[in-house]
Amino acid sequence: MANIFPKSANILPIKIGLGLSVIGLLVVAGVWYYFTPKYTRVGYQPTQPVAYSHALHVGQLGMDCRYCHSFVDQAAHANIPNSQTCNNCHKEGGVQWDNPKLAVLRQSVEKNIPIQWKQIHLVPDYVYFNHSAHVNRGVSCVSCHGQINEMEVVWQDKPLSMGWCLECHRAPQNNLRPLAKVYDLNWTAASEGKNQLEVGKQLVAEWNVRPPTNCAGCHR
């Protein structure tokens, strides 16, 4: 009886297997590369219940970050200001009290109901990050949050991934600045005619900065 398939068909299963393996590897590589914070979180910009502009309050009016985020240099977490903090300026008869954009704030104050702000910057629960440890060692807000003093609506500017954090931990001199300049979001070493690397190396030596680069440093 004559063969139905030619001899070349004998290696067809091998070809199909190799082809599926290559496709599988490409899919895994694509997911591994693109399903990272750099591609899934950077640029995230939700609409908030109150249209708060950092560009106005910080960039134009010069408000210090610590007026609203009052525990950022003392605690692990950067606190979100409560309605009373906003009401210090926007209380009845004060700045922009009748502005329709502040209706949610007025309701929050009158009914003592917290404003449901949407969280933007997020790291997994198994990652330990301490804000005070960073800002008290010369890491400015802009290093992690970008030029937030120019943002009308806040977005996530950095990936906040493990690899991104390790870049700074392995070379902290690239981001350190004098403590007096941590909350000056427009400051750069160049603005004082200095070199960032030289400034950073000097601060690393003075403060004995040695960020952990092992797993236990952040995964506790």
Image: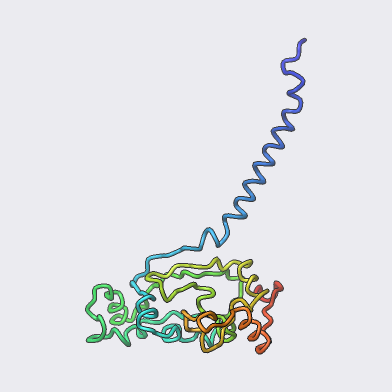
Identified at 59% across, 77% down, the residue is 175
Q: Is residue 121 left or right of residue 104?
A: right
Q: Quadrant of residue 91?
A: bottom left
Front one among 147 and 88: 147
Identified at 66% across, 73% down, the residue is 219
Q: Which quarter of the rendered picture does the N terminus lie within?
A: top right
Q: Quadrant of residue 14?
A: top right
Identified at 62% across, 78% down, the residue is 197
Front one among 191 and 87: 191
- In the rendered image, the vertical position of residue 32 relative to residue 155, given as above or below: above
View extreme (front): residue: 193
Residue 104 x/y as whole percent: 30, 74
Q: Is residue 101 left or right of residue 29?
A: left
- In the rendered image, the vertical position of residue 10 relative to residue 218, given as above or below: above
Q: Which quarter of the rendered picture does the C terminus lie within?
A: bottom right
Q: Is residue 15 left or right of residue 157?
A: right
Residue 29 x/y as whole percent: 64, 50
Query: What kind of colouring is applied to the model shown?
Result: rainbow
Identified at 38% across, 84% down, the residue is 62
- In the rendered image, the vertical position of residue 149 relative to residue 164, given as above or below: below
- In the rendered image, the vertical position of residue 138 relative to residue 143, given as above or below: below
Q: Quadrant of residue 196?
A: bottom right
Residue 176 x/y as whole percent: 59, 81
Front one among 4 and 181: 181
